[in-house]
Image (cartoon, rainbow, N blue to C red):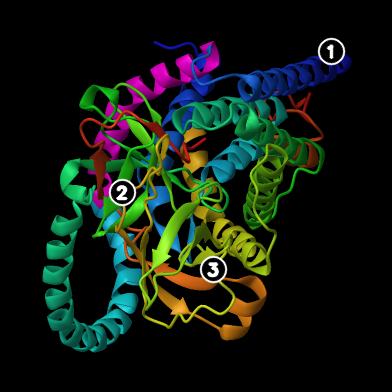
Amino acid sequence: MYDKQVRRRRAVLALLVVVSLILLTAYFGESAGSPLHSVQRGVVTVLSPIQEGASRALKPVRDLFGWFGDTARAKKERDQLKAQRDRLLEQVVGYKVALQDNAELRRTLALDENSLQDYDKRTVRVIGRPSNNLLLDRLEVDAGSSDGVRVGDPVVADGGLVGHVSFVAHGTAFVTLITDPSSSVSVKVLNAVGDSGLLKPSVGDPLDLLVQLLPRHAHIGVGDIAVTAGFRTSRLDSLYPPNVPIGRVTKADPEELASDQQVHVAPVADLRHLDFVQILVGPTGTSGERAQVGP
Amino acid sequence: MIPEQYQLHLRLAALGFFTVVIQTAAVSQVTVFGVSIDFSPLVVASVGLLAGSLPGAVFGFAVGLFADVALVQTLGVTSLLFIAIGYWAGRLRELRDPAHGLTPLAVGAAATAFATIGFALMQFMLGVRAPVSWLLLRQVVVTILIGMLVALPIYALVRRVVQGSLPEDPRRRRRRAYTTGGLSPLQRPSAGR
């Protein structure tokens, strides 16, 4: 009797492990349109209304827990923002003059701006997030292919870049954040010469981003703003439109810049407390191939 | 009326479903020191501790697969990890029969550690390129500590859900063996006869 129980237990355990390994191998080797992915897409479509309901119902609980951390952080942020506001006020006047000059020069040269105005902004609700955010940083939103969302669409919130759409089902989509290890964004630092680099997350510290591949002797200071570079070629466009704010330089050590060619940036968008984000549904008329399509 | 043998299955199915839905819709969006709380390995370990190795492994597989499907992750990764957690927690109950009140705390820490490190290793093996830094290790340690802190309330909650439909508790069996020589008081031969 005991032997029978032991044999049964081991057989079930072996069966479960084998099924998991088969699923893992099959899924990993499949393309995005294959049967397992289709099943997954179907289940996600069915589950998304439930998750949306749960997300709305549990928002007060989430807010309660978030309140403790937010209060401590808010006080520190308030002082920083006051100092920043005073500094920015002085810059605004200069920028307004520069903007007028810039618009006039652009008109003269007939440059294509490809700004955010070309995009249709869809405000969507965040309804889910993976539990392990150390090596997978994504979130689920309540809009999908039925709302015109496509894989690769850029996502913004709080006036800053959040990431891009990496998976789309009928009524839901997954957004890969700029803090996900698989993410990389071509950026431009708004210093005197507009140095370009590649934005990668700093694994282990979700609120620290690294702008890498910068010139070794670039003059970058704390407070400089990093924006999307948004390159365009004849065949390949960047996923992200140009000049979307990403973050502010928090650490620019000349030694680190000389050795690792990188500076540290804090994201503009509060990526840990997002309830709503905006998906930029492609500028009408673009049909070119897109770079950096997510996993 | 639901037959008694199916009661545990139904309760575990409901528990697994709500665990994944609540985890993804609310709990994952709350961060403490930069990491989100993950109570699904704790629920799986608690089921293993309460119901045994076989229900623990099956429950772990089901919850892991459901989480992988719902979060559009590579299928089989989380289920493989959760099978091990549910099975080991169940074997601990069957072999050691730990009676200490803080056992769920230690099991919760071990389950969170296994899930976090195992998931990271699986992601590395599947091709996620990320440097192993001190920061990452610090985050792993914080995740384990938070998992340990919430392990006791999660265990109490799971026990409340499955109470009344559990297979025979080895602790109760052992206690009875100690006081009555292995027999139920009803079966004990009367001294007067």
Which residue is at a point 63% across and 24% down the rendered structure image? B58
Asked which secondary structure carries label 3, the reply is loop
Q: Which residue is mark 2?
A: A241
Q: CA distance from mark 1 to mark 3?
A: 66 Å
Residue B74 position within the rendered picture, expressed as x and y whole percent measured from the top left: 58, 30
A274 left or right of B74 in image: left
For residue A14, above or below residue A214: above
Q: CA distance from mark 2 to mark 1?
A: 64 Å
Which residue is at a point 59% across and 75% down the rendered structure image? A216
Crowding near the residue tagged with mark 2, few <14, some 14–19, many ≥20 C-alpha atoms within 10 Å: many
Asked which secondary structure carries label 2, the reply is loop
Mark identifier at residue B20: none
Q: Which residue is mark 3?
A: A214
For residue A281, above or below residue A133: above
Image: magenta residue range: A35-59
Membership of A51 in magenta stretch: yes
Asked which secondary structure carries label 1, the reply is helix
Tag 3 or tag 1, which sits nearer the N-term? 1
Membership of B58 in magenta stretch: no
